[in-house]
Image (spheres, grey):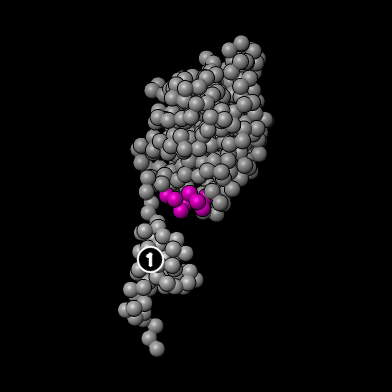
Amino acid sequence: MSSTPGPVEVVLDAEVARRYFLDAQSKVDIAAALDISRFKVARLLESARANGIVRIEIVNSFGVQSEVSVQLREKYSLKHCVVVDSGDQDPHIREIVGRAAARLLSETLTPDDVLGLPWARTVSSMVDTLDELPCLRVVQLTGSLVIPDEGSPVDMVRIASRIAGGPAHYFYAPLVLDDAESASQMRRQPEVAAAFDHVKDVTVEVVGIGRWVSGQSTIYDAATPAERHEADRLGAVGEVMGLLFDRNGTPLDASISRRLMTIDWAALRAVPDTLALVTGREKLPAVRAALAGGLVTSLVTDATVGRALLDESPSPTHE
């Protein structure tokens, strides 16, 4: 007997499929309308797919690589993961990743959340594209680096707060101080202390991940030779908000962090959701380490980094 479906079966397959997929009728309603059992409806739907009458296509829309995003989320047990459909050679990749992160926050934040923002270029790009947030508080997490054409964390917190319509907690201070004592004195300033007092309430912090090499970290070039030597000796591969970690994602007690206006490791890890924004394959060793150590819980990145993170091959340790 031929396995090719006959015309009666083809017509019935198509009728059941049309009612189920296009008219959104339930299997029970279809069974009643065609005077067949709901179990036969299920078999006919399977037959329609097997015979090519129904073809299901998952469309990659909105500029997101959905399959890679799901695989990464499952591999690293992330809360959220978005891999944009652009590689790191795209000259606008930072803006693209920032826009995706802005949409993610608009979709997932609630009025019960408190948003924490540090200084980071990709975080700045995200804030530039924000157009909707629930009414919530926004807290500054670090001081600022002075870089031409880049916004300060004060600017970012005020913009995000204005969009959200909630309170803003910010302070004016540099990210890098001359020494640990200067940083300690700065933290005791009333406006700085008041802002940092709200860090304990932050539920979602958005961060960048820096690799511990020149040009790939917010603080590497500000470190002294002695501080770089110490960090190298400790095995530093990356940093988040100026806090260094090794290849296993283990936090390091590096002296340079003590002269920074930033939160400490305990405060960073106490935040329920740490969303990292990453662009560029050069950051891979640091990103892999941060993920391995559970330092971030959500990720938005480019397609180059996303695919590489699914590759189990070892990360390069040299430029």
Asked if residue 249 lies in the magenta stretch, the reply is: no
Q: Residue, x 44% and y 73% (percent of image)?
A: 36
From this view, report whether residue 76 is shown above or below residue 219.
below
Determine the main secondary structure of the stretch shown in magenta.
Answer: helix
In the rendered structure, the answer to whether residue 132 lies left or right of residue 287 reads: left
Query: Can residue 61 be seen here?
Result: yes
| Quarter assignment of residue 265 | top right
Q: Nearer the viewer, residue 118 or 38?
A: 38
- Residue 158 in picture, x, y percent from top left: 47, 20
The magenta segment: 65-72
Q: Nearer the viewer, residue 268 or 282?
A: 268
From this view, report whether residue 67 is shown above or below residue 200.
below
In the rendered structure, the answer to whether residue 132 lies left or right of residue 261 reads: left
> Callout 1, which amino acid?
Ala
Reading the image, the residue beneath label 1 is 17
At mark 1, the secondary structure is helix
Q: Residues within 10 Å of mark 1 (few under 14, many from 20)?
A: many
- Residue 89 in picture, x, y percent from top left: 37, 42
In the rendered structure, the answer to whether residue 193 lies left or right of residue 68 reads: right
- The residue most toward the bottom is 1
Q: Residue, x 36% and y 37% (percent of image)?
A: 92
